[in-house]
Amino acid sequence: MASYACEPLPAAVKLLVAGGFGAGKTTLVASVSEIEPLTTEELITAASSGVDSLDGVERKTTTTVAFDFGRITLGPAIVLYLFGTPGQDRYWFMWDELSAGTLGAIVLADTRRLPACFAAVDFFENRAIPFIVAVNEFDGACRYTPAEVRAALQLKPHVPVTTCDARDRQSATAVLIALVRHLMATDDPSPATQVIPRKRKPA
């Protein structure tokens, strides 16, 4: 009976794309996904008035009400499965479920609303989930150096900070590669037990 040499299956890596409301999470997942991304975008209605702040993102017309999902193959040995988290406070109950089994995360930051990503940074720090911060450079937004962003977010020295345009596939893919490299350099990428988050002060 003939035997066949089986090629090893690629490693599947679950990653999260997190950040504040309107930071560009859905856009980034859609930019890099090699499959039609699963999104749960819905129109913003009057029912969210007074609940979801649109300060700084007044032209935003849709919002994620569950999560986004995409996939990207970085090579024959690794496939990334991306889960974009909802940014609104009322959907935070989903974060624990989405973070189960994840190896790392991207915290997408918007300098127009930088405090909106403080909670995401705390979430991953307090669960010992490795993450990087990617500043999504929106048109017309102020530009800051990675060092300035690091100081404003009170990040630990080992946390990488980069910039990107979430609309651009090459730029968004570079962010994923930066996260994978960070994970490879991290001794213990497994999530830890939840601890009480500390409060952050806006810079």
Image (spheres, rainbow, N blue to C red):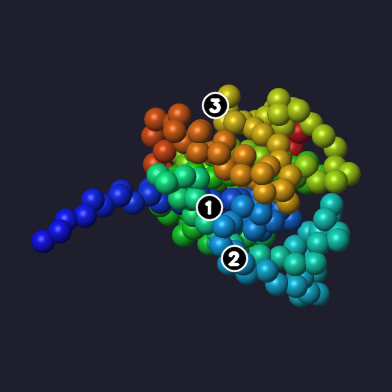
**Residue closest to the far right:** 140
Seen at 85% across and 46% down, the residue is: 139
Label 3 Cα crowd, 10 Å radius (few <14 / some 14-19 / many 20+): few
Instruction: Residue at the far left: name it.
Output: 1
Whether the residues at callouts 2 and 1 have beta carbons within 8 Å, the answer is no
SS label for mark 2 = loop
> Mark 2 = which residue?
36
Residue highlighted by disc 1: 72
Could you tell me the amino acid type at mark 1? Ile
* Residue hosting label 3: 158
Figure check: 76 above or below 98: above
Considering only order in the chain, which callout, 2 or 3, is on the residue closer to the N terminus?
A: 2
Residue type, label 2? Glu
Any part of residue 65 in sight: no
Q: Quadrant of residue 145?
A: top right
Name the residue rendered at 61%, 44% in the picture. Answer: 173
The N terminus lies in quadrant: bottom left
Q: Position of residue 136 (x, y in %)?
A: 73, 44
If the image is split into quadrants, where does the C terminus sit? top right
